[in-house]
Image (cartoon, rainbow, N blue to C red):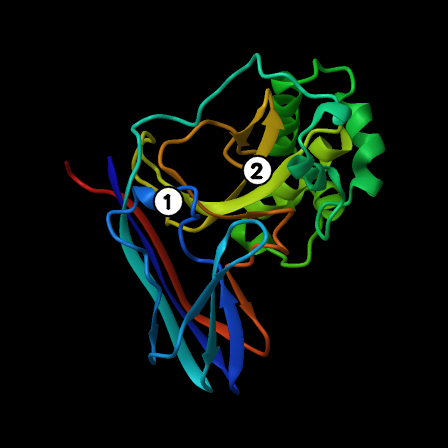
């Protein structure tokens, strides 16, 4: 299926302000774009791209004082299939994990494994290791946190989300990642688009979303503690240890959001 994806964001800055954007489709999936998802700005400013240590495509620019608008619009080819499920995927012993998964066992800015490991073992230590254990984590987090955009807090950590029981998709994801890592399961944070294809209408207003990938059975698998169900048209933009590694836009100075729209719409065949 063909999915139109994109965004239109406007920020205000009181002075010249450098920024880094992680707003392109990840290189793992960029070949599925009909055309490159170039970023455009108003006013036009020079854009410089590079790839970070997690394989994310990053764009550097310098915003002038006043208003900066950042947009993109593209078409993505996605399989008409839900996120894959493999209930027999095993959990690996730490000694058997590939080296490139090991950093996703460690605590990070928003995922305090040192504070939550004992609680993870208390809650999930009796579950069968592997897929069933990760699904148990997602079930728990999905039911424990109450979602609300008015509950968003850019500094809330996994431990705080657990204590407060409120948050948005990034909080669900941080808490599930911290529990998984506490149980010696590599888990990484993902950000991108999720379509509403396959869901009953009317659709909710679109936004960027967060989910996690865990390493089981020799590969990475998608788990989504916020929605807690496989989805069609999940499109990765960035991945890292937690949200600190993958901000949508990182400003090196004062800024304010003036407008913010996201679209993820299936196109007719």
- The residue lying at 32 percent from left, 56 percent from top is 37
**Mark 1, secondary structure of its residue:** loop
What number is the disc on residue 204?
1
Residue 228 x %, y %: 52, 29
- The residue lying at 68 percent from left, 42 percent from top is 165
Residue 71 x %, y %: 34, 65
Mark 1 neighbour density, 10 Å: few (under 14) some (14–19) many (20 or more): few
Asked whether disc 1 touches disc 2, contact meaning CB atoms under 8 Å apart, the reply is: no
Kindly report which numbered mark, 1 or 2, lies closer to the viewer in this rendering. Answer: 2
Using the rendered image of the protein, determine whether residue 28 is visible from the camera's viewpoint.
Answer: yes
Using the rendered image of the protein, determine whether residue 145 is visible from the camera's viewpoint.
Answer: no
For the image shown, how many numbered marks are present on the structure? Answer: 2
Question: In the displayed structure, would residue 14 be above or below residue 105?
Answer: below
Mark 2 neighbour density, 10 Å: few (under 14) some (14–19) many (20 or more): many
**Relative to residue 11, is residue 252 drawn left or right?**
right
- The residue lying at 50 percent from left, 52 percent from top is 56
Alpha-carbon distance for marks 1 and 2?
A: 22 Å
Residue 35 x %, y %: 25, 52
Question: In the displayed structure, would residue 89 be above or below residue 245?
Answer: above
**Mark 2, secondary structure of its residue:** strand
Q: Which residue is mark 2?
A: 212
Q: Quadrant of the N terminus?
A: top left
- The residue lying toward the viewer, choosing from 78 and 15, is 78
């Amino acid at each position: 299926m063909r999915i139109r994806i994109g965004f239109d964001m406007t920020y205000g800055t009181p002075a010249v302000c450098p920024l880094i954007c992680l707003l392109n489709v990840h290189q793992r999936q960029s070949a599925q774009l009909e055309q490159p998802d170039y970023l455009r700005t108003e006013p036009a400013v020079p854009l410089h791209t590079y790839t970070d240590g997690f394989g994310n495509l990053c764009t550097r620019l310098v915003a002038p004082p006043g208003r900066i608008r950042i947009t993109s619009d593209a078409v993505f080819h996605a399989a008409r299939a839900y996120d894959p499920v493999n209930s027999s995927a095993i959990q690996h012993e730490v000694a058997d994990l590939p080296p490139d998964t090991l950093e996703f066992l460690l605590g990070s800015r928003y995922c305090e494994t040192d504070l939550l490991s004992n609680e993870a073992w208390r809650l999930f230590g009796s579950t069968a290791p592997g897929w069933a254990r990760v699904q148990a984590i997602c079930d728990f987090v999905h039911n424990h946190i109450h979602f609300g955009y008015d509950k968003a807090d850019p500094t809330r950590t996994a431990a705080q989300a657990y204590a407060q029981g409120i948050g948005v998709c990034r909080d669900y994801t941080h808490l599930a990642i911290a529990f998984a890592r506490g149980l010696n399961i590599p888990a990484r944070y993902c950000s991108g688009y999720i379509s509403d294809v396959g869901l009953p209408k009317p659709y909710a207003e679109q936004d960027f979303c967060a989910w996690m990938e865990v390493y089981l059975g020799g590969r990475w698998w998608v788990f989504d503690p916020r929605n807690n169900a496989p989805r069609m048209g999940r499109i990765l933009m960035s991945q890292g240890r937690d949200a600190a590694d993958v901000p949508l836009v990182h400003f090196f100075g004062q800024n304010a959001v003036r407008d913010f729209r996201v679209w993820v719409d299936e196109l007719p065949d």
